[in-house]
Image (cartoon, rainbow, N blue to C red):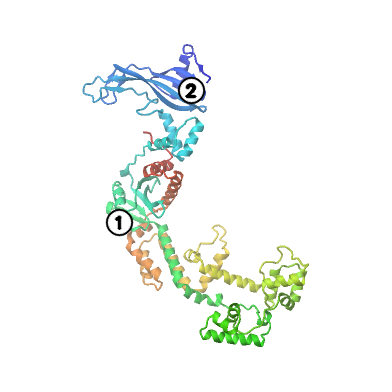
Amino acid sequence: MSKRVIDKVSTKKRVDQTLVKISGWSGVRCYKYECHEGYIEAGIQSTHHAAKCPYCGRRSNQVHSRYARTVSDIPVHGLSVILKVEVSRYRCLNPQCSHRTFVEQYPGVTERYQRRTPEQRRQLQGILVLAASTVGTRQCASMGIDISPSTALRIVRSIRCDVDYASYKHLCIDDFATRKGREYRTLIIDADSHVPLEIVPSRDKADVAKALRKYKHATVICRDRSSAYAGAIKSARPRAKQVADKFHLVKNCGEHLDKQLRVSMPEIMSELSPALERPIESGVRWEDMYKPPTSRDIELFTEIHKLKTAGLSNESIGKNLRINTKTVAKYQSMDRPCGRKLTASKCVGRYIDIIQEGMTGGQGYTAIRNKIIAAGGYVDYGALRDGMKKVFPTYRPKRGYGNKMTSPLAEAQKERASARHLLSSNRMHIYVANSAFGVHEHTGECSKERVLADTLISRSGTLQDLRLACKSFREVMSGDAPDELNAWIERYAVSRYQHIASFAKELKKDISAIKNAIRYNFSNGPMEGCNNKVKAVKRSMYGRAKDDLLLIKIICYSQNYVHEN
């Protein structure tokens, strides 16, 4: 190991002054400065010959003993700095003092029970509080400070987050999952500064009420629709105004609307049946797909249906008529007797003029089939493709040309399919509840699904009634007249739509908190953002997310500063 010792006589004064100026230490001097491979070692002594007792405050100059302490300081150019500090133990001269001896501490250099300087401890706290322990140790190692993950956690836990509970007047409260579906915690934040204040170990009424009793001057408490939180607030802070969250109220309205749509869907489908169930004039002719039935086909069709009416199974019918059960199933699915299915080439021959016209333009099988359907005929896509390959083996359609369903019949069929899909999906209640969904914020342009939803709503009286109920509730919540809520409840509590009536009756149980949501400009929106931060920090801690450690990290994330010990 290479070692270079600086001359203690010629450079002592210069090294001493440089260290004092850089570090800002007072009452100490550097008597040794050595550069080693990978670290720097400096010797520190006190310039005082007396010290004050930290227990009684009396000064003493009687030295009991001396010993050396090793303290780690902030690195210099990636090199660790090790301080060899000579400290003195003094005898206390006060006979009334509870301690006979005490050890002097150098301000900015040493602290009780610490092997790091205060400056290094502050830097480590600022780094480790924003990262996981394993990630933080790697970052510190790159700076020249070697610590273990467990030490990183101890350093974070040493951060003091003192909360003056009595100074907060407006609070937000909500729960978050530590193990989804199993364990939950309650987070309390300041509604004005959005700073987390406390993590309650559960969401039970008793635990939450015990935590809220510390906030003696709380006048407004925002919450969701939880009855446990409502009871806890009423028990702990009965004079505080409870404010229900508007977002959860509108969300609950949408959930009841979704349930009502499921119940009323048969009625809605009957109202929309002229548009959805209108028979498609496809020009399908029975003789286009099958040969005329023979006497054997008519006989089998009659016998199979007769035996099936008598209650026989397919196996029994097959044994009696000496045919396969698949043949029995085929005749059962027929509405009338028919012969064998035409081969592909014969189907193609019926529409040879349309096919040749499409081949002249290089159109694909789908475009040619759409033309056949638009002309009043019908042919299966597979039959058309196979037949054209047999009759015209050298024909190759142009890639990507004319393969879209462009015929009016195909477009109408596609529109009806889209309408059925929208009604059967979980998105219809969004368009009914929110008239602005699917509309561009700046241009006002509506999406295709938005236009389709508006068309369906305009054709159904049930959908119009449900949209009016949700729209009027949203207007009441966004307005500034709490008394309008009573009128809305009275109107829809007796509605024929059972889930809307149920929602209106539920609002009566929490009417004061809902009116406060209209009256006051408070919401649980900041709490949702804090919950996202909590979840992100919790996942980064890899199973070490205890409540005390999690709270320290969340507070430092939000406040962006670290309290000194």
How far from the left and from the top, in percent, is residue 69? 38, 23
Question: Which residue is tagged 2?
Answer: 40
* Residue depicted at 36% across the width and 39% down the height: 161
Q: Is residue 350 above or below residue 302?
A: above
Local SS, label 2? strand
Mark 1–mark 2 distance (CA, rounded to whole Å)? 61 Å
Circle 2 residues within 10 Å: few <14, some 14–19, many ≥20: some
Tag on residue 531? Answer: none
| Left or right of 272 on screen, residue 116 | left
Q: Nearer the viewer, residue 384 or 206?
A: 384
* Quarter of the image with the C terminus in it: top left
* Residue depicted at 61% across the width and 73% down the height: 412
Identify the mark nearer the N-term, 1 or 2: 2
| Left or right of 394 on screen, residue 555 | left
Amino acid carrying label 2: it is: Ile
Q: Is residue 98 above or below residue 355?
A: above
Q: Are marks 1 and 2 in contact (CB under 8 Å)?
A: no
| Left or right of 380 on screen, residue 94 | left
How far from the left and from the top, in percent, is residue 473? 41, 64
Q: Is residue 141 visible?
A: yes
Could you tell me how many numbered marks the image carries? 2
Q: Is residue 376 visible?
A: no
Amino acid carrying label 1: it is: Gly
Question: Which residue is tagged 1?
Answer: 231
Image quadrant assignment for residue 546: top left
Local SS, label 1? helix
